[in-house]
Image: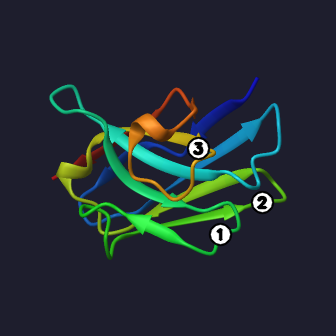
Amino acid sequence: QVQLVESGGGLVQAGGSLRLSCAASGRPLSTWTMGWFRQTAAKERDFVAAITGLGDATEYGDSAQGRFTVTRDRAKNAVYLQMNSLKPDDTAVYYCAASEVGNTAYAASYDYWGQGTQVTVSS
């Protein structure tokens, strides 16, 4: 059984930064694509970023391009999301997910999900 646990969320002012972490346990996920998604009460779960198992390729959603960076530490079975220049529109619950399929922006392709961490950006 795989467990993903996100951390690092919180309240930050617009223009600030946060670094989210996702720790995986239960099995090594070093060959799996890891992704970040976010969701608000009014919207579906949106793709934020993904990184391949080897960490040699990344993909970003439109909202994350140029501001967010996804990285991973395969030895620690962990993935990170550095978020800079945060905006109030970035306010959401951020989820970490794992997929065997490959570099993908589609939530349906992910097999395991964390419980999410709340990010709130004040104006």
Q: CA distance from mark 3 to mark 2?
A: 15 Å
Residue beneath disc 3: 99
At x 56%, y 31%, the residue is 114
**In the displayed structure, does residue 112 sit left or right of residue 25?**
left
**Apparent side of residue 111 relative to residue 40 in the rendered image (left or right):** right
* Residue designated by label 1: 55
Badge number at residue 43:
none
Q: CA distance from mark 1 to mark 3?
A: 14 Å
Quarter holding residue 4: top right
Which of 108/67 is in front? 108
Front residue of this view, candidates 49 and 15: 49
Residue that appears at 27% across and 66% down: 15
Count of residue discs: 3
For marks 2 and 1 on the same chain, the one whose residue lies earlier in the sequence: 1
The x and y percentages for residue 20 are 53, 51
Q: Which numbered disc covers residue 74?
A: 2
Give residue 90's position: percent from left, percent from top.
Answer: 26, 50
Mark 1 or mark 3: name the one nearer the start of the chain: 1
Query: Which is more foreground, mark 3 or mark 2?
Result: 3
* 73 lies above or below 3: below
Residue 66 position in % (x across, y down): 32, 76
- The picture places residue 29, in percent across and down from the top left corner, at 75, 47
Element marked by disc 3: strand
Q: Counting residues from the N terminus, which is met first, the one under dot 3 or under dot 2? A: 2
Amino acid type, label 3:
Ser
Label 2 crowd (10 A; few <14 / some 14-19 / many >=20): some
Asked whether disc 1 touches disc 3, contact meaning CB atoms under 8 Å apart, the reply is no
Q: Tell me the amino acid under the disc marked 2.
A: Arg
